[in-house]
Amino acid sequence: MCGIVAVTGYRKALPLLIEGLKKLEYRGYDSAGVAVINSESNIINCDKSEGKLKNLITKVKDKSIAGTVGIGHTRWATHGKPLIKNAHPHMDSTGKVAVVQNGIIENFLDLKADLEQDGIIFKSDTDTEVIPHLIQKELNNLSKLDLESNGSTLLIAVRNVISDLEGAYALAVIWSGAPDSLVVARKQAPLIIGLGEGEFVCASDTPAIANFTKTILPMEDEEIGLLTPLGI
Ligand code: GLU
């Protein structure tokens, strides 16, 4: 049971993510982390800390990241010790895809073995890290089809990847190739979307959304969504 929070909109994402994580800390205190797409550089800024959320807050308190799209996580470890290398968000090898996950990917060892055969070097012991690597691989395949680089491309890539995942999970994904977009998906793990004015927040539980909006859309089981400031 981890806590996920994710935002896309017009306000700076980092403070919104931290506020959301404060409300989700009861779901896990092994580590915490955030990733935000910096709208000035188009690079994903990722910060993580071991232990309670206060350690992450201390780490990012003087940071001002311009990005309005980001994901956050508070972890209760299932695969991999509660170390910083296992803290979420997890990223692909290029640093362009970041993922937070709540749940267990039961077939991760098989998926990991295939990716290692392709030359991917894993940085963590978690089940989650296969996901960003698989998404990057899928994005590479899609780029050969001359598709535009936008949120729909990310949606297709995530949809294709989750069809290979076994287990129960909720996840949120960002990609620097679509800097206004957020893709979220769930299967037998909770995820709800808060509908704001020109902004959306997605989280594991309502307290993380309560200060943001009263309008909540629970995601259906096995539903996937693309969120941008313009809509869902
Ligand atoms: N299996 C993931 C991990 O250990 C998520 C854990 C959870 O949802 O509790 O990193």
Image (cartoon, grey):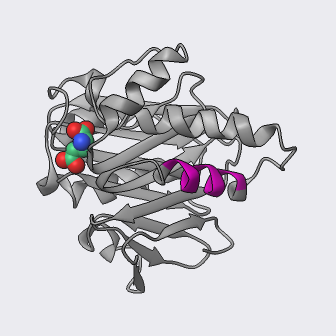
The answer to whether one can see residue 25 in this image is: yes
Q: Position of residue 212 (x, y in %)?
A: 40, 73
Q: Which residues are magenta?
A: 153-161
Quadrant where the C terminus sits is bottom right
The residue lying toward the viewer, choosing from 111 and 51, is: 111
Residue at image x 53%, y 13%? 119
Residue occupying the point 32% across, 59% down: 20
29 vs 20: above or below = above
- In front of the other: 159 or 44: 159
Q: Report x, y in % for residue 187.
A: 34, 64
Q: Is residue 159 left or right of residue 151?
A: left
In this view, the residue in front, 72 or 10, is 72
How many marks overall?
0
Q: Would you place residue 203 above or below residue 25 in this image?
A: below
Q: Quadrant of residue 146?
A: top right
Residue 64 visible at all: no
Say which residue appears at 70% left-offset and 48% top-offset: 178
- Which residue is rendered at x = 43% and y = 73% of the image? 193
Ligand 1 position by quadrant: top left
The image shows residue 62, relative to residue 122, as above or below, that is below
Classify residue 178 as left or right of residue 51: right
Q: Is residue 199 magenta?
A: no
Q: Position of residue 174 (x, y in %)?
A: 55, 47
